[in-house]
Image (cartoon, coloured by chain):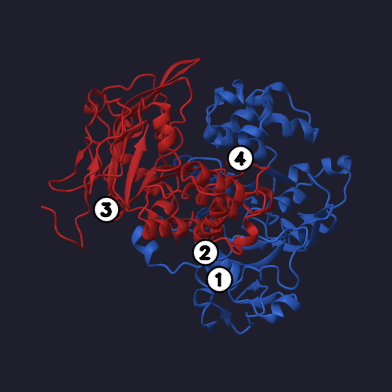
Chain colours: A blue, B red
């Protein structure tokens, strides 16, 4: 028997919107049952990657393979057969749930679209079971989204996403619109469901603390490209790319004593435009360590400690730069 | 309730720059009266950064709006807001106009919607200076360039002629801060100033706020839901819940020994470094922030609190010092136990 295909394979994915190069050559693999976080700031193209995977947009170039099937250019009709393989949960549950539909109909919608014939009673039972799985009472099926709290609505979108038993869940900033205490319950829920059901997950977010909590692997995106990939442990303890290092250093710790001992890494605010990305390394205009070669030559993706980093200062032997020592341009080894 | 609207005596040295006393705000809505802020008292010392934290619906933004005098018609405000001795609650418009922008300034979450898109940033900064400082156009422009330098905008002499859409989000927020501090206000109220920004940009904005305090002695009230931001910049913290102050302490005390159960819940709800779902669950706070029409004589957190009993539902706990001679206050009948192993002084 051939080994099971990866839940998701992206090869050199490109998505341009007119002149805007939102995604510019992203390759990524998510094995079955693993959670990969796609991290980046606004404008990095991380949400566009998610939209390409569920084919809300058709990629300009490259391939998207879900469970081994190339879905990059399938027509709407052809896609229908693969719709149940992948689901998406969006950031804003108020905007992604139809306000005129009952929660029960919203959650059952993927079953209807899958074309499988189900009796009304079976359908109701499936919906009730799914609501139960996300911690909602079955009565919620007869409510409208506006009658629910933000956290409950996000549970409804998770139930809708999981009712078709997908192998891959795209979670696009699923907790960003929620308050801290509600975030905790949604993160717990996603972790429980992922462990129990075993779906693979592309967790798209800018929230590094949530990433460390939920992800197995991490891919860091900057201006349409991946700059670093690695295991959670590697990214959080030995980040190699200056951007990853700056991102981790900039996220404040909820601990005043430790936070005030940290050395700040300040990047300029001026994010370059995806209309006209910088030559060479795209991060060079904000990188405290940039030198001549960064402008003239695009850094190759260097295999590094089981991961990858695209930076001229990273070597396969484990040599990596340190942005915190930017003044002395010191290099760690 | 004092509603004189007159300039008070000059503040005594060491007097607070901003003083809130029993500030309450209610709104008339279609669904009836909603009580948003309930008897909030707070002092902001000169050069102090106070962080106000809580989830949405806790009344923190309404508190900021009342200080700014920006509450809608449907709001009823009582209590006192004194800015260096001048009462702002019920003050005449002429008093407010003199004070706003000059003595007290505000920055809000969304810099794009707070800036005028058809005026250059320079024009927007000079407007404040010409109105309040009666500066000439030329002097105001020179000052605008200085201010842009102060808030860390590169090539300020060219940026001063940019329109808001030509700037990034972080730059726009820096411009907002430059406008806010143009007349050297004693107090700056910053309502979620970094929430719409990326973390790498946020770090720079927080640095600007710290610089202002260090260089100009500005007192800053920063309102945020982000405990990391509080841990980074605040000297003292006020925790709000359902319109009330439930805890107030020095920042290190609050994070090390939260007394109120809500504070403790907030602190343990966010993931901490090194923690993964495989080894530990996040602590949830069940339930929701209540929407109250009247403030009950009870603890409003009781329904969500693991330690609540009959007493919590019968009487509102006062905001009292948690021990003798401390500035750590909490409004809780059953505060979290203090961990026994304390490296600092042993509190008896």
Q: Nearer the viewer, residue B336 or B125?
A: B125
Tell me where residue A156 appears, x and y as whole percent: 60, 33
Q: Nearer the viewer, residue B287 or B296?
A: B296
Disc 1 to disc 2, C-alpha distance: 9 Å
Q: Is residue B62 visible?
A: no
Q: For mark 2, does the 10 Å Cα neighbourhood hold few (<14), some (14 to 19), or many (20 or more) residues? A: many
| Residue B335 location, quadrant | top left
The chain containing the residue under callout 1 comes to A
Q: Is A110 rendered above or below residue A52? A: above
Which label is found at residue B113? Answer: 4
Mark 1 and mark 2 lie on one chain; the one further toward the N terminus is 1
The chain containing the residue under callout 4 comes to B
| Residue A116 location, quadrant | top right
Tags 1 and 2 touching, CB below 8 Å: yes
| Element at label 3 | helix
The chain containing the residue under callout 2 comes to A
Which label is found at residue A239? Answer: 1
Tell me where residue B4 appears, x and y as whole percent: 29, 26
- Identify the residue position indicated by label 3 in the image: B253
Residue occupying image coordinates x 71% and y 72% = A281
| Element at label 4 | helix
| Element at label 1 | loop
Tell me where residue B271 appears, x and y as whole percent: 45, 53
- Identify the residue position indicated by label 2 in the image: A248
Tags 1 and 3 touching, CB below 8 Å: no
Q: Nearer the viewer, mark 1 or mark 2?
A: 2
Q: Is residue A221 left or right of residue A297?
A: left
Which label is found at residue B129? Answer: none
């Amino acid at each position: 028997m051939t080994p099971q295909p990866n839940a998701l394979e992206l090869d050199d994915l490109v998505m341009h919107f007119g002149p805007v190069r939102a995604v510019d050559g992203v390759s990524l693999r998510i094995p079955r049952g693993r959670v990969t976080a796609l991290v980046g700031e606004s404008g990095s193209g991380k949400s566009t990657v998610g939209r390409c995977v569920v084919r809300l947009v058709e990629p300009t170039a490259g391939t998207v393979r879900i469970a081994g099937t190339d879905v990059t250019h399938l027509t709407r009709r052809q896609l229908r057969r693969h719709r149940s393989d992948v689901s998406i949960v969006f950031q804003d549950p108020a905007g992604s749930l139809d306000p005129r539909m009952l929660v029960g109909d919203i959650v059952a919608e993927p079953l209807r679209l899958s074309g499988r014939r189900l009796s009304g009673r079976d359908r109701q039972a499936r919906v009730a079971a799914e609501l139960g799985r996300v911690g909602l009472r079955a009565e919620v099926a007869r409510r409208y989204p506006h009658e629910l709290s933000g956290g409950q609505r996000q549970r409804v979108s998770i139930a809708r996403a999981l009712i078709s038993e997908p192998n891959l869940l795209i979670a696009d900033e699923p907790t960003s619109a929620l308050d801290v205490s509600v975030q905790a319950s949604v993160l717990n829920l996603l972790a429980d469901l992922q462990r129990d059901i075993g779906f693979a997950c592309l967790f798209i977010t800018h929230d590094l603390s949530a990433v460390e909590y939920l992800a197995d692997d991490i891919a860091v995106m900057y201006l349409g490209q991946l700059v670093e990939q690695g295991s959670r442990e590697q990214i959080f303890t030995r980040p190699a790319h200056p951007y990853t290092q700056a991102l981790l250093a900039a996220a404040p710790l909820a601990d005043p004593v430790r936070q005030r001992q940290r050395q700040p890494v300040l990047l300029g605010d001026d994010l370059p435009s995806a209309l006209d990305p910088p030559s060479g390394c795209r991060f060079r205009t904000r990188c405290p360590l940039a030198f001549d070669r960064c402008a003239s030559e695009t850094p190759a993706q260097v295999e590094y400690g089981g991961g990858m980093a695209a930076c001229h200062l990273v070597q396969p032997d484990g040599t990596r730069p340190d942005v915190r020592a930017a003044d002395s341009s010191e290099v760690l080894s | 309730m004092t509603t004189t609207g007159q300039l008070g005596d000059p503040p005594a040295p060491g007097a607070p720059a901003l003083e809130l006393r029993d500030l309450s705000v209610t709104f008339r809505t279609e669904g009836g009266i909603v009580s948003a802020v309930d008897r909030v008292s707070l002092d902001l010392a000169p050069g102090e950064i106070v962080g106000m934290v809580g989830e949405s619906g806790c009344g923190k933004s309404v508190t900021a709006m009342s200080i700014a005098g920006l509450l809608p018609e449907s709001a009823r405000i009582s209590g006192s807001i004194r800015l260096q001795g001048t009462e702002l609650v019920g003050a005449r418009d002429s008093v407010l106009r003199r004070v706003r922008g000059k003595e007290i300034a505000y920055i809000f979450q969304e810099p794009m919607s707070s800036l005028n898109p058809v005026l250059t940033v320079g024009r927007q900064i000079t407007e404040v200076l010409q109105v309040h400082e009666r500066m000439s156009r030329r002097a105001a422009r020179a000052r605008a360039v200085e201010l842009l330098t102060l808030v860390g905008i590169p090539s300020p002499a060219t940026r001063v002629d940019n329109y808001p859409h030509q700037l990034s989000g972080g730059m726009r927020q820096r411009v907002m801060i430059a406008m806010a501090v143009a007349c050297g206000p004693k107090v700056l109220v910053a309502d979620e100033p970094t929430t719409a920004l990326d973390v790498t940009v946020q770090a720079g904005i927080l640095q600007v706020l710290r610089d202002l305090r260090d260089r100009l002695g500005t007192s800053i009230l920063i309102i945020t839901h982000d405990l990391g931001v509080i841990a980074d910049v605040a000297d003292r913290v006020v925790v709000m819940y359902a319109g009330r102050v439930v805890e107030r302490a020095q920042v290190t005390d609050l994070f090390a020994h939260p007394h109120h159960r809500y504070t403790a819940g907030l602190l343990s709800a966010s993931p901490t470094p090194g923690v993964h779902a495989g080894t530990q669950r996040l602590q949830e706070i069940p339930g929701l922030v209540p929407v109250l029409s009247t403030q009950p004589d009870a603890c409003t957190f009781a329904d969500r609190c693991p330690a609540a009993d009959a007493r919590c539902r019968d009487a509102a706990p006062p905001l009292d010092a948690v021990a003798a001679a401390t500035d750590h206050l909490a409004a809780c009948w059953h505060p979290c136990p203090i961990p026994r192993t304390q490296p600092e002084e042993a509190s008896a």
